[in-house]
Image: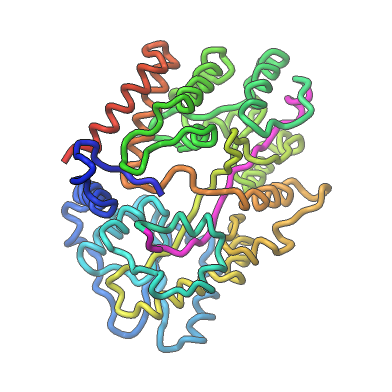
């Protein structure tokens, strides 16, 4: 995993990886946690129970969790589970408050980016001390790697999603395109044909600094590195310039809607459902939304693999489970976390949530396979699952990754609007990022 660091010290005096990440996380956490330590977090119960926090999974999955927890409780009567579901927008502040006040739950559902921030403060139980190699081997190796910090596992992978391409076959047919693009090179060619033959756009990818990270992931897929092992900017390279040039050229040729500068991914969904966009990057579950919101478009929509670059990498989003170091019963907490994420439970949850599992045996289940004549949703799920053998977290879960995205997107927009050249933009982004890392 790449880490960020100061560029102002000589090699001999450079702080360690853990020291650098601890410094950044302390800055970020201090900014978020002011006033939270005395929040309403309740002290842990002293009855042998475990408190389990999830992120916005009620009410849709209430029955699933009640049944799963009842099953665990029946086998572990001395360790009852108290389930608390936290709204997505509140989870970060609530867990910060709980960690600060030493009232953290025993088991928590988080994303790797935020979990890694607290991992640098030793907030989580070091799982390699509790989970055997055999137990770890149940999970996809590249996905497990996304839950490690400084050589130590801090989380257990849970459910995953990988984007696929959803294509309007009528628009592609009208443009004379017989194969759904699989690479960015093919996408650029298709964009020209679609615009020339139909007057519509082939694709939409948001360049709004605070929106989705799909654009940043695309640059990594094209071969751009983000940061080096010392935390310095690694994107001001020929590969970085080529990635910038790819999206700038499409924008200036009017092959991307100008709204990519001001609108987020929701606009792509709206355009696709209105028949104004030939392709959409989304999860397989989106077929259900299309069928409900735009049934005519659903009938002419086909799933295809995620578009990628020369690296052939596939982007994956990961949710994991972590165990706070403050738990009074680490063995039981690990046992419950492994129970929630075991192959059988992952299969059951995937079927309810239309997500992918992080366990290898679960992926082999027929549920993640589909015949050529199967419904679109089933074929989309199968394509998404097939991609997992080369999927990885392309944007490392670093404490200041959103600031890096903001810097790069802002500079890319400046080039698209002819305010800077690509070299000027990347030089500016490099200087801004490296200066940010040197700030105490």
The answer to whether 89 appears left or right of 300 in the picture is: left
Can residue 66 be spotted in the picture? Answer: no
Relative to 438, residue 140 above or below:
below
Which of 300 and 144 lies nearest the eye of the viewer? 144
Q: Give coordinates of residue 357: x percent, y percent.
A: 59, 60
Quadrant into which the C terminus falls: top left
Name the residue at the right extreme: 373
Residue at 49 percent across and 76 percent down: it is: 69
Q: What stretch is highlighted in magenta?
A: 151-173
Residue at 66 percent across and 44 percent down: it is: 287
Residue at 25 percent across and 50 percent down: it is: 25
Residue at 43 percent across and 58 percent down: it is: 147
Q: Give coordinates of residue 296: x percent, y percent.
A: 73, 34
Task: Tell whether position 267 is magenta.
Answer: no
Name the residue at the bottom extreme: 78
**Which image quarter: residue 436?**
top left
Q: Give coordinates of residue 51: x percent, y percent.
A: 36, 73
Which of 264 and 335 lies nearest the eye of the viewer? 335
Which of 1 and 121 lies nearest the eye of the viewer? 1
């Amino acid at each position: 995993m790449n880490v960020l660091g100061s560029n102002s010290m000589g090699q001999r005096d450079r702080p360690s990886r853990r020291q650098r990440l601890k410094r950044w996380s302390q800055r970020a956490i201090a900014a978020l946690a002011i006033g939270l330590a005395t929040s309403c977090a309740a002290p842990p119960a002293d009855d042998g129970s475990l408190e389990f926090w999830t992120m916005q999974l009620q009410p849709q999955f209430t029955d699933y969790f009640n049944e799963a927890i009842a099953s665990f409780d029946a086998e572990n009567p001395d360790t009852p589970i108290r389930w608390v579901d936290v709204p997505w927008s509140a989870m970060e502040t609530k867990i910060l408050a709980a960690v600060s006040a030493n009232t953290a739950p025993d088991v928590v559902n988080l994303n790797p980016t935020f979990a890694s921030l607290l991992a640098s403060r030793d907030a989580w139980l070091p799982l390699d001390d509790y989970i055997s190699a055999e137990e770890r081997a149940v999970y996809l190796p590249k996905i497990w790697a996304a839950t490690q910090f400084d050589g130590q596992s801090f989380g257990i992978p849970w459910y995953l999603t990988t984007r696929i391409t959803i294509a309007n076959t009528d628009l592609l047919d009208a443009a004379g395109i017989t194969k759904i693009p699989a690479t960015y090179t093919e996408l650029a060619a298709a964009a020209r044909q679609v615009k020339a033959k139909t007057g519509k756009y082939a694709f939409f990818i948001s360049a709004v600094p605070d929106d989705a990270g799909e654009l940043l992931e695309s640059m990594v897929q094209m071969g751009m590195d983000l940061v080096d092992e010392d935390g310095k900017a690694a994107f001001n390279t020929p590969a970085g310039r080529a990635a910038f040039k790819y999206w700038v050229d499409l924008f200036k040729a009017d092959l991307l809607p100008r709204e990519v500068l001001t609108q987020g991914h929701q606009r792509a969904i709206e355009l696709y459902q209105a028949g104004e966009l030939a392709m959409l990057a989304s999860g397989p579950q989106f077929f259900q939304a299309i069928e409900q919101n735009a049934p005519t478009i659903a009938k002419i929509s086909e799933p295809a693999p995620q578009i990628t670059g020369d690296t052939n990498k596939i982007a994956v989003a990961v949710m994991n489970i972590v165990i706070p170091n403050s738990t009074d019963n680490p063995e039981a907490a690990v046992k419950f976390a492994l129970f929630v994420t075991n192959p059988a439970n992952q299969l059951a949850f995937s079927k309810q949530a239309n997500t992918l599992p992080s366990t290898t045996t679960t992926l082999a289940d027929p549920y993640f396979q589909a015949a050529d004549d199967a419904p679109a949703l089933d074929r989309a799920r199968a394509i998404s699952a097939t991609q997992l053998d080369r999927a990885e977290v392309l944007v490392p879960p670093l404490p200041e990754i959103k600031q890096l995205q903001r810097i790069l997107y802002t500079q890319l927009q400046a080039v698209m609007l002819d305010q800077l050249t690509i070299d000027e933009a990347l030089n500016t982004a490099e200087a801004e990022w490296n200066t940010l890392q040197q700030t105490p």
